[in-house]
Amino acid sequence: MSACILPPSIPCPSQLVYKQPKPNVRCLLFDEEGNTVDQSVSKSGILVLAVDKDDPIKDHPNFTTANPNDKLASFGFLSDGSPRVCTMDWVEMTGESEFTIIGRFGQKVKVNGVYVDLNALEEMVNQDLSEHVADCIFIQTSELKIVMLYVPQKGSTFNAAPGEIVQMTENLFALKNVAKVPIRNCLELEAFPFNDSGKRDLKKLRHIAENIDSYGKSVQYPSLIIEDTPLSRTAAKISTLGSQILDNPALDGRNYYIGGVGFDSLSVVRLALAIKNEFDAEISPMILLSNGMTPTDVAQLVVDIQASRPGTLPIVDLAQEVARLDDASVTAEGLPPFVFPEPFEGIVLTGATGFLGAFLLYELAHKFPSAKIYCLVRAPTEQVAVERIISTAQKLVLDPSQRAFLDHNLKSRLVGLCGDLSKNKWGLSDERWKEISEETDMIVHCGAEVHWLFDYLQLKGPNVLGTATALRLATTHHLKPLHYISTIGTIPMAKKADKPLEETIYSAWNISGGYSQTKWVSEQLINKARSRGVPVTIIRPAVIAGDSQYGVSNSDDYIWRYVKGCIQLGVAPSHATPVTMTMDPVDHVAKVVAEIAGSEESLSKFVFHISDSEHSALTETKLFEIVKAFGWTVLFESHEQFKEAFHSHPAAESNALFPLMHIMMDMSVKLDNANTRSIYPTPGVSATVLAKKCLSYLYHVGFLPKPENPSSELKDGVYPEIGIFVRTGRN
C-alpha cells in the first residue's frame, strides 16, 4: 500500500500518474490474452512488471511454482525467461515508467447486449451503501450470470439479508439512472480473500461465485402478487410460460429476471412465440433478454399493446361507409382525355395554414413558377385568408432566401379561398367553384382535422367529405390530378408487420384511431375514382417532424407533447422499449410531395411512402438519450414503472403526457418506399440529427423547460426571429 499527502495549498489533481522508481524494473503491457502489447501501437493494457532474467528473484517459490500455461497468472516468466508480475490493473502509459490506472482488468462485461463496468458499480455501492456494505464485488460467471459478493459493515444497526442488499443495490442503480443489471445471486462473506500481492484474490472470489448455489444463502426471486387485474394475470401466465420452457418449476409464480435464469437465444424465441400465441402480442426476443426484464415488465408491454386496440377500433362499418359515399359520377367518362399539364397554370392547395401546408406552399410555388396557387382557408374575407397564409409561412419558413421568395414571388400568385372542408363545395360560392374548376389543373389535398382522440364520426366532415369534394373538383370541367396527403396509419395494425409495408392499397379496415380511419375511407374513395380513370396519387408520410435546417416544429404534435410530458414527470418508459419511431423533416416531405406532383410517372405508381427504415427510424430509447444529453433529467424505466410514476404524480391530469399513454405503442413500423425513391431518391437528414434540431428549437421557443444542466448544443443566437407554432385554433 502506498499513500500521498498533499498540503492544503496544493489542489487535488484530476488524475493520478504513478511512476515506477526502480531502474531495474521494466513496465510492460499485456493484452486480454496475455500477449505483450507493442507500446508504439497502443499505450493501454494490463500492467506487467518485469526484471532481468538473471535476477535472483527468479528462484522465489512464487515464480518457481507458477503455472506456465496461465499467461495472466500473478507470477510467471516472459518468453525470454525474465521474471514478471501481472498486476491485473488496466493502465495507460504516459511515459517510459509512468502510467495512470484505468481500472481492474476483466470488470467491464457485456450483460444482455449492454456493456457494464462492474468496477463502477462496485464503487457506487461502496460509496452510497457504506452504512451497510464494507466492500463488494460483482462477478460475471461462466454462465454469464451476475453474482454479487459483499462484506457487511461492522457495527451496522441494520442486519440486512442478502435479498435486502440486492434490493437496496437495485434501488441505488435506478436512482443513479444505471441500466438494470440482473443480479442473479448474492452472498455475504465475512471477509474477502487476498493474494500474495495484497490484492483481492479474484480466482478464489470467482470460484465462490461459480459455486454460489452450494452456499445456501442465495437470493430467491420474489413471488408475484396475484390480483384480479389484466396486468397481474398476464404476469402470472408469462412467469408460468417461462418456467415451462426452462423446465424449472421453481420459477413458476416468481418475478424473475428473464435474462438471468438461463434463457438463451433459442429458448427466448420460444418464449416470444408463446407470448404471441397466448396474447396476440409480439415482443422481440431482444426486448425479453434486455437488462432487468421480468414477467411483470413484459406483462406491462403486453397490456399496453392490447390497450391500444379496443376503444380505438372503428365505431362504424368503414367498408359500408365507402360504399355509401362512393360517387359514380366522379369519373373520367364524358370529359376530354387527360393530358399531363405542362406547365401547370393553377394549383388548388388545402391545408396551407397547417404545419406541412406552409412548407408545401413554398415548394409548390418554387417547383411551378408560373402557377397561381388557390388556397382554401377558414377566413371572413379573401384578404384575411391571404394574410393568414403568409403569416403562417413566415412563422415556419425561416431561411432568409426562402422568406424573400415568399414575400416577393408568391404574394402576387396567391389566391385566398374562404371556405370550409366539411361543407358542400367546401363552402365556396357557385362562381368561385366554377372559376377554380376551369382555371386550375392540379389539386394537392393536404387539409384535414387532426385530433388523436376524436372518433371517426367527429372527424368525418372535414376529413372524408372534404376528400369527396376534392374528387368532385378533380372531375369538374376537365380532369385534374389529385394528390392526396394521407398517413401510414391507414395500414391495418401496422405495428405487427415483420417486413416492410408495401406501397399499395389495403382493404382490411381494422384501423386504430378515428383520424386514421377517416384517412382509410378517403383512400378507398380515391382508389375507386382511380378505377374510373381519375388521375390520382396517395402519399403517406409517417411522423412529420421539424425542418432539416432549424428544427422548426409543431409543438402540438403528439411526439413532442409526449417528450414534454416525460420531462415534466422526470421519467421515460425507455428501458427495454419496443418502440421505434419513423420521422422525416417537414421540408423534405414537402419537397417529395412537390416532386411527385410534378411527375407524370407518379400517376401510374399511385401510392408513395416517404419514409425509409435506414434514415427515418429512431428508437424511443435513442430519443430520450438525446433528451438526457441535452441536460434534462429523465430516469429510464420500464413501461410498468413508468405508469406507476405517472399515476402517482400529483399533476398527472395536467401533464402534457396525459392523452398520449398508448399512442407511442403504435409507432413501430418498417416501410418500403421504392415508388418514392424512383421519383425522388435523395433521403432526408437522419432521424437522430433531426431530433436534436427539433428539441433545440422547442427549447428556444419556450415549449420545453430549461434543462437543469443545459448542453452546449443548446446554443443561443442560431435562429432568426422565431415564435412557437401550434395548430390554428386548437388547444
Image (cartoon, rainbow, N blue to C red):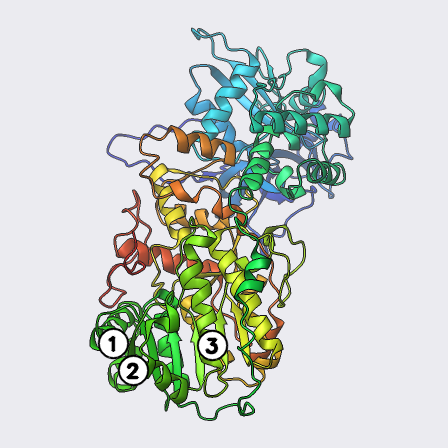
Mark-to-mark CA distance, 1 and 3: 25 Å
Q: Earlier in the sequence, mark 1 or mark 3?
A: 1
Residue denoted by label 3: 472
Classify mark 2: helix, strand or loop: strand
Q: Residue at x 34, y 36 (%)?
A: 653
- Residue 24 appears in the picture as rendered: no
Q: Specify the quadrant of the image occupied by residue 158.
A: top left
Nearer to us: label 2 or label 3: 3
Q: Residue at x 36, y 37 (%)?
A: 569
Q: Residue at x 40, y 83 (%)?
A: 347
Mark-to-mark CA distance, 2 and 3: 23 Å
Up-down relation of residue 292 to residue 38 (above or below): above
Dot label at residue 386: 1
- 622 relative to 224 in the view: left or right: left
The kind of residue on which mark 3 rests is: Arg
| Whether label 2 touches label 3, CB < 8 Å | no
Q: Specify the quadrant of the image occupied by residue 6.
A: top left
Q: Please state the horizontal and vertical placement of residue 257, each as a whole percent of the image.
A: 62, 28
Residue denoted by label 2: 414
Classify mark 1: helix, strand or loop: helix
Mark-to-mark CA distance, 1 and 2: 7 Å
